[in-house]
Image (spheres, rainbow, N blue to C red):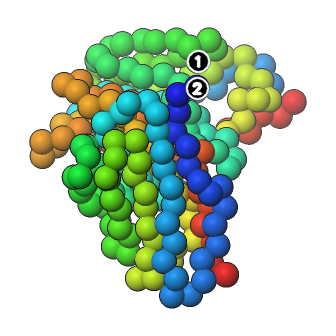
Amino acid sequence: GQQLNQSPQSMFIQEGEDVSMNCTSSSIFNTWLWYKQEPGEGPVLLIALYKAGELTSNGRLTAQFGITRKDSFLNISASIPSDVGIYFCAGTRWDSGTYKYIFGTGTRLKVLA
Amino acid sequence: DGGITQSPKYLFRKEGQNVTLSCEQNLNHDAMYWYRQDPGQGLRLIYYSQIVNDFQKGDIAEGYSVSREKKESFPLTVTSAQKNPTAFYLCASSKKGANNQPQHFGDGTRLSIL
C-alpha cells in the first residue's frame, strides 16, 4: 500500500531548539493528521487539519495543510525532553466509496538536554 | 473514560498456533481498524470495518482474520498461515460520517514467536 514521504527520518536536537518536519505526496488529500507515538504505546492524535491553507496550533505545536493539498508540515517550538518520540503524518482521501487513511513512515525525534 | 482498550499488552505464539488479539472501544465509533507496525516502518492496514457484521481486507490481510459482531469489539486472529507474525499490532477507531474523521488508537499488542 501507499505510504507518505515523511522527512527527516530522524533528528537529534538540543533542548530549546525549534523543530520542523514535513510530509509530502503526489496525491491530493482531504485531511492531514499528525500523531505522536512513544515507545510501546499507540499513536496519539496531536493536530487534525481539514482545509487547504489551514494553520492550527496545539500548545507548542503548529501544523499547516499545504495549499496544493499534497503536503503538510509540523513545527515544534522550544523543544523539551518529553518531545522525544516518533511523529507520524497521515492523510485521508476518498477512494472507492470510503475514506482511505495513508500514513507516513515517521520522524524519530531525540532531544538532547 | 472513553477510549480504546487492547489486550493483552504482550502475547507469545507457538508454531502452528492461532492467537486472538482483543480490541474494545467505548467511544461509540462506527469504524474500526487493525494495523501492523514493524520496527522503523509506518503502519500497514490489515483489516477494517465500517459497520457491524461487515469488514474489508486491507493491504496485508493474508494470514489474518477478523469479526465484527458488536459495535464495540473488533478482535483480530493471527492464524498459523501468517509466517512472520512478530510485530506490534495497533487497533484504531473513528466516527463514520460525511467528513473524514481522525482515527484514535489503542496502546497496542506486541506479538512474539516462541
As displayed, is residue B34 above or below residue B102? below
Judging by the rendered image, the residue that carries numbered circle 1 is A61
Amino acid carrying mark 2 in the image = Asp
Image spot of residue A92 (x, y percent): 30, 35
The answer to which of B48 and A44 lies nearer the viewer is: B48
Q: Quadrant of the C terminus of chain B?
A: bottom right
User: Pointer 2 indicates a residue of which chain?
Assistant: B
Residue in the picture at 52% in, 12% down: A57
Residue A80: image x %, image y %? 77, 24
Q: Which residue is mark 2?
A: B1
Q: Which quadrant is home to the N terminus of chain B? A: top right
Identify the residue at horizontal 64%, vertical 26% (top origin): A19
Q: Which residue does the image show at 73% across and 22% down from the upper left?
A: A79
Q: Secondary structure at mark 1?
A: strand
Tell us which disc is closer to us: 1 or 2: 2
Q: Is residue A31 left or right of residue A44?
A: left
Q: Which residue: 58% across, 18% down? A: A61
